[in-house]
Amino acid sequence: MLSRVADSLYWLSRYLERAEHTARLTDVHLNLMLDQSPDSARRRWRRVLAALRDPVSASSKDAYELAQLLTFDLGNESSVVSCIVSARENARQVREQISSEMWEQLNRLFHEVKRTDIDNLWDTEPLEFLRAVKEGVHLFHGITDSTMSHGEGWQFLQFGRSIERASNVAALLDVHFQQLPLSEDADATDHAEWIGLLRSCTALEAYCRVYTADLRPERIAEFLLLNADFPFSVRFAADRLREALEAIHISTQSRRADHVSRLAGRLGALLGYGQIDEIIAGGMHQYLDNIQRQCAQINHSAYLLYVTYPIEAALEA
């Protein structure tokens, strides 16, 4: 596969995952504003911005300004609209590699977000818009799985989606576990914060099926980090990431793929053999920061291997 095609498919998937993630966090925290004090609202928005790696201070902006920043601000590369615009541009560049149904769904989502602005949204129903974005991205993934050959191009889409999700969820957990107490005697406010974290990962119902409604921070950490079956856990994303890379390596038959495979395997082992009590004892921040650094290393190494490789490497492959 041409490097430009691999690059566009990879970033198409990453941008859509980022758009859905940002829409989900914004949706959850707009909902939480209905029963919270101004101080707790500012703390929550600060966590959202930190989890999205946005340097803007929440204390200087109200909910309207923050919603604008996270949804429609084209100057913010991680805003919902910016991500969807970038995803569509990447899809346009590889139009011949994706199905007509995929392009139509992404184009439909693009025009839906472009014809809306924050003033109209705020005066009507902002949560409906954010839910439409989430559902539009989910529909795109379903159409992709149903209409695109599951070959090398499809694997690059899975790789991009999985590495973005693993890094995003790890960052979200890191922010929450740095700022919220791990003790079991948390008050009602802390209880609402943990529910908000689970909802931010669409995990509340799935968590309750495993642990009932007993919300304990260490169990939440275990579920969102180490559960092998839940799609928004870090381990699940890391497993899909490794599988996609293995399939790409087999397809390309590159002799230089061992390094990237080892990096993906190391991340999988870190999560596959992790024990939550040992992780907490050793420092949750250090563990989650390590996951994010490993995701960055995998991204960098895979990019060098498949996208920005020198001509000499292509001749050796």
Image (cartoon, grey):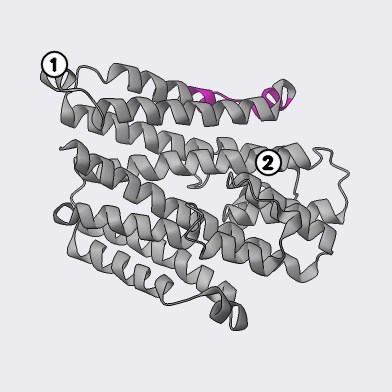
Identify whether 2 is placed above or below 40. Answer: above
Please name the amino acid that badge 2 sits on. Answer: Val
Q: Is residue 54 left or right of residue 300?
A: right
Q: Nearer the viewer, residue 156 or 208?
A: 156
- Where residue 140 appears, as percent x and y from the top left, is 33, 61
Identify whether 280 is placed above or below 256. Answer: below
Give the numbered dot on residue 316: 1
Asked if residue 277 lies in the magenta stretch, the reply is yes
Indicate the secondary structure of the residue bearing disc 1. helix
Residue 154 visible in this rendered orientation of the protein: yes
Identify whether 106 is placed above or below 17. Answer: below
Q: Residue at x 74, y 57 (%)?
A: 60
Q: Is residue 38 left or right of residue 282?
A: right
Q: Residue at x 52, y 68 (%)?
A: 130
Which portion, as a residue range, is magenta?
Answer: 269-280
Q: Nearer the viewer, residue 11 or 31?
A: 11
Asked if residue 255 lies in the magenta stretch, the reply is no
Q: Residue at x 21, y 53 (%)?
A: 93
Image quadrant containing the C terminus: top left
Q: Is residue 242 left or right of residue 218?
A: left
Residue, disc 2: 175
Please name the amino acid that badge 1 sits on. Answer: Glu
